[in-house]
Each structure stands twice: as structure tokens, then as C-alpha cells.
Image (cartoon, helix red, strand yellow):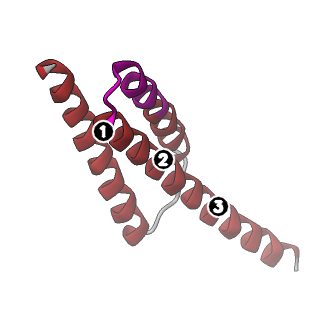
Amino acid sequence: MRVLRYKRLLRQHEITRYEFIVIELDLAITFLEIALSAKDENKSQRNEEHANVALSAARRFLSEASLSEQTRTEIEWRLSRVSSLQHEVEETRAHD
């Protein structure tokens, strides 16, 4: 009985970890999109910093995550999107 409970709790923990990572990456994407659309340089930089905090949190939890191939693919897509947006923010700043 205890083993089953432990396994159930462990599985729930992994699901919660995955959900947290996804939320943090989605936050990073949102903050970077705001940074790109901001007319004010301070607002843009502030949102880029918020994105970096969210990305850092996601990476910290990702290093310990046990993910299925499907969930890993979903997270890799989000990481790729974050990287792309970060590049766009840098390019925008370089041209301003």
C-alpha cells in the first residue's frame, strides 16, 4: 500500500514539475513578446529581465525532470521559441 502511494505521489510530483516548467516558459515567451512590442526602452528591458528570471526557474526544474518524449518535445519547442524571441529582442535593440 505504501509503495503504491509513494509511486502515485512521485508521479503527481513529476506532473506538477512539468506544469511548472511549462508555465515558466510560457511566462518567458509572454514577457519577451511584451519586450518586443514595448515602445519604451525601460519597459522593454524590464520585461526582458522578467523573461530571464522565468527561464532560469524553468531550467532549474528542468534539470531534475523525468519527462516523456512527448513532454520533452513540448518543452523543447518552448525553449526554442524563447531563444528565437531573445534573438529578436537583441536584434531590435541593435537597430535602435
* Picture quarter with the N terminus: bottom right
Foreground: 37 or 50?
37
Q: Which residue is mark 2?
A: 27
**In the rendered view, does 65 fall on the left or right side of 29?**
right
Q: Which mark is residue 16?
A: 3
Residue at the extreme left: 95
45 part of magenta stretch: yes
- How far across and down, in percent of the image, does residue 95 sit? 11, 21
Badge 2 marks a residue whose secondary structure is helix
* Element at label 3: helix
Amino acid of disc 1: Ser
Q: Which residues are magenta?
A: 37-50
CB under 8 Å between callouts 2 and 3? no
Relative depth, front residue between 25 and 95? 95
Mark 2 / mark 3, whichever is N-terminal: 3
Say what amino acid the circle numbered 3 marks: Thr
Q: Which residue is mark 1?
A: 37
Question: Which secondary structure class fits the magenta region best?
Answer: helix
